[in-house]
Amino acid sequence: AGMAYVQSSHCGQILPKLVGSYEAPLQAWMQDIVKRRYRRILNVGCAEGYYAVGLARACPDTEVLAFDIERQARGLCRKLGGYNRIDNLQIHGLCSHETFENSAGAGCLVLMDVEGAENELVDPERAPALRDSDLIVELHDFKFAKTRERLLDRLSGTHNLELIKDEARQQGDFPSLSHLPPELRALAINERRPPGMEWLRAISRS
């Protein structure tokens, strides 16, 4: 809340981000992130910076590293950071296992939405620093079968795990839209997600 925003969304619909309904099931987790005062947050798949800039703004003492392989996304994220006068944000391209080894670990959060590449990246055998990191990962089972099963197996020995499912947004939860007719309210909160989306939160037991 309170961010100045760019005029387009690199990934996903922009109206839910402006309304405040975007990924609504995660909002309690986002509030918990602010309370935990992480020393570093790695936002992998940052798009235009909704989370990277938002969390950098909400956690001014936390170093935020944003990663995206798309040049346009990085440019929008840089612009969004500038609009909000953020000085605790760094923007990078590819994130790798080596990146985790150099930048993750105790006191760090990895926030990831990489369209299925979590199957490769979230691998504590190849990046042991993940065992000491907290993670929030959007799961893409609809693209790659058994993604959830694979990540649960990899993290169950070192983390406390929690899954949350996407759910339909209710128009009445967003009073700022009350002046609009129902069909436009429905459009404003429609993220056009495939059914059954899930997110995984893994809190390191170390």
Image (spheres, rainbow, N blue to C red):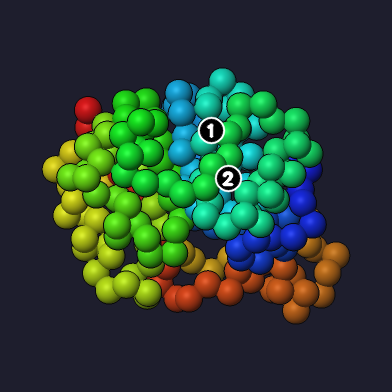
Q: Is residue 25 left or right of residue 142?
A: right
Q: Residue 75: percent from the left, percent from the top?
A: 69, 49
Which quadrant would the C terminus be assigned to in this image? top left
Which one is nearer the viewer's eye here, 85 or 55? Answer: 85
Q: Is residue 152 left or right of residue 71?
A: left
The residue shown at (44%, 64%) is 115
The residue shown at (69%, 30%) is 86
Which one is nearer the viewer's eye here, 135 or 183? Answer: 135
Give the residue at mark 1: 64
At label 1, counting other C-alpha atoms closer than 10 Å, the crowd grade (few under 14, some 14-19, many 20 or more) is: many
Q: Residue furthest right?
A: 179
Whether residue 164 can be seen here? no
The residue shown at (37%, 74%) is 143
Q: Which mark is residue 13?
A: none
Task: Please tell me how many numbered marks the rendered image carries.
Answer: 2
Q: Residue 31: percent from the left, percent from the top?
A: 52, 37
Q: Which mark is residue 51?
A: 2
Q: Residue 61: percent from the left, percent from the top?
A: 56, 20
Amino acid type of disc 2?
Tyr
Q: Quadrant of residue 4?
A: top right
Which quadrant would the N terminus be assigned to in this image? top right
Which one is nearer the viewer's eye here, 142 or 171? Answer: 142
- Kindly state the secondary structure of the residue where label 2 is placed: helix
Q: Is residue 131 left or right of residue 14?
A: left
